[in-house]
Image (cartoon, rainbow, N blue to C red):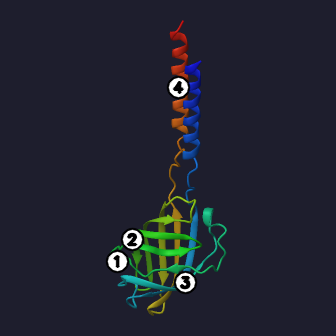
Amino acid sequence: MKLHKTLLTIIAAVVGVGLLSSAQATPITGMLNIGGTATFDTTSLATAHSATFSDELVLGGNTGTFAGFAVGTPVVMASYTFDPSTITNGLWSVNGFTFNLLSSTVVSRSSTFLSVSGTGIITGPAGFDATPGMWAFTSQNAGGHPHSTFSFSANTVAGGVPDGGMTIVLLATGLMGLAAFRAKFAKV
């Protein structure tokens, strides 16, 4: 009888810990599109190395976590250097979400077109996990002016979602059941 009560106490404790550990944050999913005006350090996009931004707004076509973001919502963007690649914390922030830029690669450029891509981490308000993301930035400058429109898209990276500890709870419960079974038949 004493072994039975001890096992029930252990099982209750393991299940309680398992339920607590399964209360985890939610990964950020989907794509966010941003547009506005970019000012570059040169008048030719073929030689540009950095950009500052103004009039940044959420555009349409957002999915996942970002699907409910209203078109026209203001976005805060930091200036950044893309050539050479420069880590930029807080490259953009909107509705409690922030994109921390880790790397940049110039994909294509000419005097009137620039395409840059890379990786970063998207963080969100309480309840969301920091999530790896890929991004793309494009700009056109047909008039040779230092100001041009830009678009920026951030996509979360698909990956496995942790199970929150339920596998460990099930394993522990099975092992304790096996121990109880063994203890019961060891007396016979």
Q: Quadrant of residue 96?
A: bottom right
Q: Secondary structure at mark 2?
A: strand
Q: Which residue is outermost to the top? A: 188
Of labels 4 and 2, earlier in sequence is 2
Name the amino acid, label 4.
Answer: Met
Q: Within 10 Å of the Cα at label 1, are there few (<14), some (14-19), or many (20+) other Cα atoms?
A: some
Determine which residue is flagged by label 4: 176
Q: Alpha-carbon distance for marks 3 and 4?
A: 60 Å
Q: Alpha-carbon distance for marks 4 and 1?
A: 58 Å
Determine which residue is flagged by label 2: 104
Determine which residue is flagged by label 3: 36
Horizontal and vertical percent position of residue 175: 51, 26
Q: Within 10 Å of the Cα at label 3, are there few (<14), some (14-19), or many (20+) other Cα atoms?
A: some
Q: Nearer the viewer, residue 117 or 57?
A: 57
Left or right, residue 146 beside residue 70: left
Of labels 2 and 3, earlier in sequence is 3
Q: Which mark is on residue 83?
A: 1
Of labels 1 and 2, earlier in sequence is 1
Left or right, residue 53 beside residue 20: left
Q: Quadrant of the C terminus?
A: top right
Whether the residues at callouts 1 and 2 have beta carbons within 8 Å, the answer is yes
The residue at the point 53 percent across, 49 percent down is 161
Name the amino acid, label 1.
Answer: Asp
Name the amino acid, label 3.
Answer: Gly
Whether the residues at callouts 4 and 1 have beta carbons within 8 Å, the answer is no
Whether the residues at callouts 4 and 2 have beta carbons within 8 Å, the answer is no
Whether the residues at callouts 2 and 3 have beta carbons within 8 Å, the answer is no
